[in-house]
Amino acid sequence: MFKRNFTEEQQMFRDAYRKFLAQEIVPNMETWREKGIVDREAFRKAGDQGFLMVWPDEEYGAIGDKDFRYEQIIIEELAYARCNDFYAPLHSRLVGPYLGNFGSKEQLDRFMPGCVSGETILAVAMTEPDAGSDLAGMRATAKKVGDHWVLNGAKTYISNGINCDLVVVAAKTDPENNPHSLGLFLVERDMPGFERGARLHKMGMKAQDTAELFFNDVKVPAANVLGDPTKGFYYLMEGLAEERLIAACMALSAAQMSFDLTLEFVQARRVFGKSLAAFQNTQFKLAELRTELDIQQCFIDRCVEAANSGELTTVMASKAKLATADLQMRAADLGVQLHGGAGYMDEYPISRQFTDARISSIYAGTSEIMKIIISRDLLSADYVPFNTRNF
Ligand SMILES: Cc1cc2nc3c(=O)[nH]c(=O)nc-3n(C[C@H](O)[C@H](O)[C@H](O)COP(=O)(O)OP(=O)(O)OC[C@H]3O[C@@H](n4cnc5c(N)ncnc54)[C@H](O)[C@@H]3O)c2cc1C
């Protein structure tokens, strides 16, 4: 594997974050998994130490560095500490940027300090019972009445659904005349008519709370509309490349962790009088996996550079997500297989690596949707055959 391109400052940030996770997060994960929710205090502690949101301007209490590698480090360290279900990157780099990119100065001043400190936990609510991949099928509506909007609808599978204080809610703003007119609304914890359903029970990612949200005649002040209330689809599309890069970084670092756990196990396990690592099947399987991991790591690191220079496209990020989600699942599956019966036991971490991995090809756009985006590009007029490209 090539030397990876992190600055000295970023290496120090990694060391400090690793220590923070070991002290403040890892010891609590099992309790949070049993409860199905991370304590709000975890967000505040991360915020206190500058680990929650790195990119917002310093005036809001953050470090103010937009380099995506900080988020990549956070994601990797969460995976290596095996606490991906402390899903802080959703708050920090997936939802936060909606506020950062499309919020007014007044909205930033009002909400950003709390988001950076961890007082205000964020969520984004797009998916509905009948509209996931097909967001255009959304039924939630927002109607302008005087100086506010009246929001109605139900959302499901919302990460941080129980913990959240501020939700970016997508709703149609002109359903009769223009089904593509979508608004993004900042709904606050105590707004009358905003209710949370029960916490949903999941196969994996147990500590990360997921819930249904209900909006019944919620009066949202005009001051809580993000940007133009007809351009929500465009805003969502803008965030997609980075959202998928986050998912890809998460999937790949979890796959790296599954590899490490498996390599350690096969060296310790003895079967038929010798080390499991001595069998050619074990060696070949691990050699193949190590090769794929190294190749994908190069691609992901290159995507991170492209995100930093503003060159990351939705198609590129879709390829990153498609490939890494598949590799994460296969790495966990091979890990379970090489662990034998132990791999099926909760006391071995590879077991949770497997159940946690299953979500990656579903959320942030399913693998089928990634393939649709990639194939659409292949068939578009802009596609340039590889052999005629100018590099
Ligand atoms: C743990 C978890 C956390 C989540 N967090 C959030 C969140 O914070 N906020 C949020 O808004 N949403 C969230 N989601 C929702 C997630 O983004 C959706 O579940 C996902 O986009 C898929 O939508 P769906 O569940 O409606 O499946 P569907 O869209 O019904 O898909 C079902 C199947 O059909 C396939 N399919 C759909 N359309 C096509 C097509 N055109 N061609 C071929 N195949 C197709 C899909 O790929 C899939 O295999 C979360 C989901 C989970 C499970």
Image (cartoon, rainbow, N blue to C red):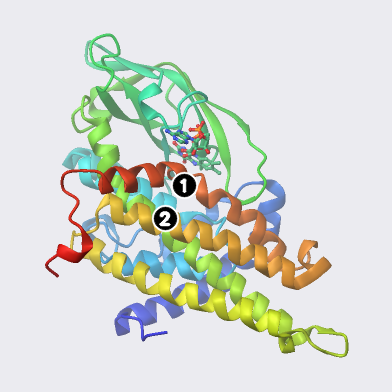
At 21% from the left and 30% from the top, the residue drawn is: 231
At 63% from the left and 64% from the top, the residue drawn is: 332
- Where, by quadrant of the figure, is residue 302 drawn? bottom left
Q: Position of residue 145 (x, y in %)?
A: 26, 10
Whether 383 is drawn above or below 342: the answer is above
Q: Quadrant of the C terminus?
A: bottom left
Badge 2 vs badge 1, beta-carbon distance below 8 Å? yes
At 67% from the left and 76% from the top, the residue drawn is: 262
Direction from residue 318 to residue 277 in the image, left or right: right
Direction from residue 57 to residue 12 in the image, left or right: right
Whether 214 is drawn above or below 57: the answer is above
- Where, by quadrant of the figure, is residue 80 drawn? bottom right
Of all residues, the one furthest to the right in this rendering is 272
Q: Is the CB of the residue bearing disc 1 within 8 angstroms of ligand 1?
A: yes
Q: Using a 10 Å C-alpha cutoff, classify the residue at mark 2 as few (fewer than 14 neighbours), some (14 to 19) or many (20 or more).
A: many
Whether 19 is drawn above or below 25: the answer is below
Whether 90 is drawn above or below 141: the answer is below
Q: At numbered mark 1, what does the secondary structure look like: helix, strand or loop?
A: helix
- What amino acid type is highlighted by mark number 2? Lys
The residue beneath circle 1 is 367
- What amino acid type is highlighted by mark number 1? Ser
Disc number placed over residue 321 in the picture, else none = 2
Of all residues, the one furthest to the left in this rendering is 390
Which comes sooner in the sequence, label 2 or label 1? 2
Q: Position of residue 217 (x, y in %)?
A: 41, 13
